[in-house]
Image (cartoon, rainbow, N blue to C red):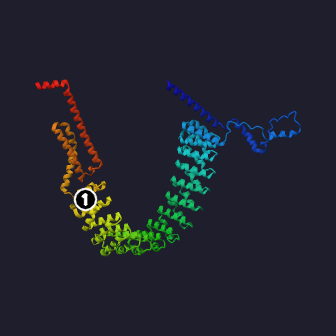
Amino acid sequence: MNVMVHMIFIMIFLAANNNALAEQVHRYSHRSSGVEKKSLPEKKAGKQNGSAKKAPSKTAKVPQKPKNVSSKPQKKETVPSKAPAKTPTPRPYERNASDSKTEVAQLLQRLAELGAVSSIIPLLQDSDPGVREGAIEVLGQLDAKNAISSLIPLLKDENDSVRNKAIEVLVQFRAREAIPVLVLLLQEKDSQMRINAMAALVRLNARGAIPDMIRLLKDDNTTVRTAAMDSLAELRAKEAVSGISALLQDNDSRIRIRAMEVLALLDGKEAVPGIISLLKDKDDRVRVSAIKALQALDAKEAVTGMMLLLHDNNAEIRSMALSLLRTVKAEEAVPEMIPLLRDGNPGVRINAIAALEELRGEQAVPEMLPLLNDSVGSVRLQAIDSLSRLQKEEFIPHIASLLHDKDERVQTRALELLAEIHRKNAVIPEKKTIADVAALLQSPNKNLRAKAAAALKELDAKEAIPDILPLLKDSEEEVRLEAIRALAQLQATESIPALVHFLKDNEPKIRIAAMGALVVLQGKEAMAEIAPLLKDPVPEVVYATKERLSQLQNPLLTAVISKSVNLLIVLCPILAILPLFLNGAKFFISITVFIGSLFLFRQLANLSLDTPYLKEGALLGNVYLIGVLLIFGAALFLKASWWILVSLIKGSPDGEEDHLEARIK
């Protein structure tokens, strides 16, 4: 009964609330009617004659003269005609502006919460633009696509904010039916409205509006012309190439630059002649953009113009011209490029080296060699890289001298090249080179010390072992690691005591590296030294130790271990279920065998090289063990249940009777 009363109360409350909302909506959607509409002619009349607002109207009644009042006070009778004695009673629709806006916002919020789209749509016709804009926004929040037909007329609203909000929501709704009206907005006097309309058409993928957008390429407003190019670029409107090409002659350099960018995006190869003409533009930015556009269009016909830019006053333009000539394989430009190896700008020299490497190959080596002594380190690096790729024997003798370079980047690159060339069995003056490399082991730069140790390892420089040994005490972990690897590779047995000490180093990487070095230097003798690391607190170290120990095992033993693991994988589940079928002593023996087999499986799996996925800690190994233990637990549970059931049966009177009869028989 109480529930029924509550339900009736809630229904009455909602009905009253909806009626109140409907009344508010009706009042706000008809605020321009009634008394207010009647006052409009009076307002218009007031605009025609400003002074008439204060004078009484012809139809107004003139106040009667009191009987007992003398003629002196008669002058005061004109006062009521200038200002009414009483303040007019405010109409219901007349409110303070801020209060009205607040009330409208609250109303829209309540309608939004109720999802009352049908009550919001009438507010789109409200006389207040703020109400119309708010109603549009709420419809957008509610994703009320059924209101599209009511929103489209607002694209012609006299208020810019209302129109912009209508555009925003219609685009959100992907309302393609709004495209015809949006196309009309491209002819609006307001430039921002034309721009907004283009943006909306792009988002609606209105390719049918492309011809109308092309016309805006001739708009008087620079911003509109730019927006038109951007919109056509987004629509990939290749039919606009001709119209955009015309903008290459625009007075505004920004328009010319953007036109080239869009033409490159649209692959407008027919515009190449116009772009080439801009290589002579007075504006550096325009010339730079022209080079970029021609490079993107792979315009080989621009070679002649590009060669002229190799002598441009702007270093960036000279550098970009080199890049373009390199891209189009302009071998005819090589004679013009060679002098740029001596250009005053390092960036130009770097690009000249790269271009000549690609276009001239080994023939460019004589011109490049002097740049190994360039004053700028980055130029020397480019020369080293190019010469090393050309694989010219003339370059090899210069590597040793680069080890003394003042730029550490150059020294590092020289060390790397030494190792690479040695691996390719090229002839290197080893004694002099090894001495120069060993000197770098004392460098203050940690990376250089590490690279020097690695290079000596690659050069198989056993005579450098005494120089490498001190690096075992280096403060940098990276240097110590490279020293350990180098000493192991060079078979430096004198380093064994230090390596044994490193097995207790605080850094896991050092312990692992030392372990690997001891295995290389001692073989099986290292097993006793590294075995304690099986109890290391770091899992990576434990895993590495097991791997090293496995490597030291006898191949036959390794094969036996692998076969045993595979056998136990099958046997353990069988042994887990076996106790279910055994009684007495056999039952307990089967449990003992199962536990022993499981323990043996775990140990052998950790030693096996063929089944790393079953090692301790591995996901599959853990899943397997849990599965086997579950089988074993299920078998014991069933066995215990059977024992209990048998005991109950034997304890019953019928069971005892059957038992006695069996004994008598």
Q: Which picture quadrant has residue 591? A: top left
Q: Position of residue 69 (x, y in %)?
A: 87, 35
Q: Which residue shows up at 54% across the image and 39% down it?
A: 144
Q: Position of residue 638 (x, y in %)?
A: 23, 35
Q: Where is residue 63 in the image (x, y as percent from the top left)?
A: 82, 35
Residue labelled with disc 1: 530
Front in this rendered view, residue 562 or 424: 562
Front in this rendered view, residue 654 or 231: 654
537 versus 490 height, above or below: above
Front in this rendered view, residue 272 or 652: 652
7 versus 226 height, above or below: above
| Residue type for callout 1 | Ile
487 versus 184 height, above or below: below
Q: Residues within 10 Å of mark 1 (few under 14, many from 20)?
A: many
Q: Which picture quadrant has residue 119? A: top right
Front in this rendered view, residue 60 or 214: 60
Task: Specify whether residue 277 is in view.
Answer: no
Q: Where is residue 543 in the image (x, y as percent from the top left)?
A: 28, 55
Left or right, residue 79 beside residue 395: right
Q: Which picture quadrant has residue 481? A: bottom left
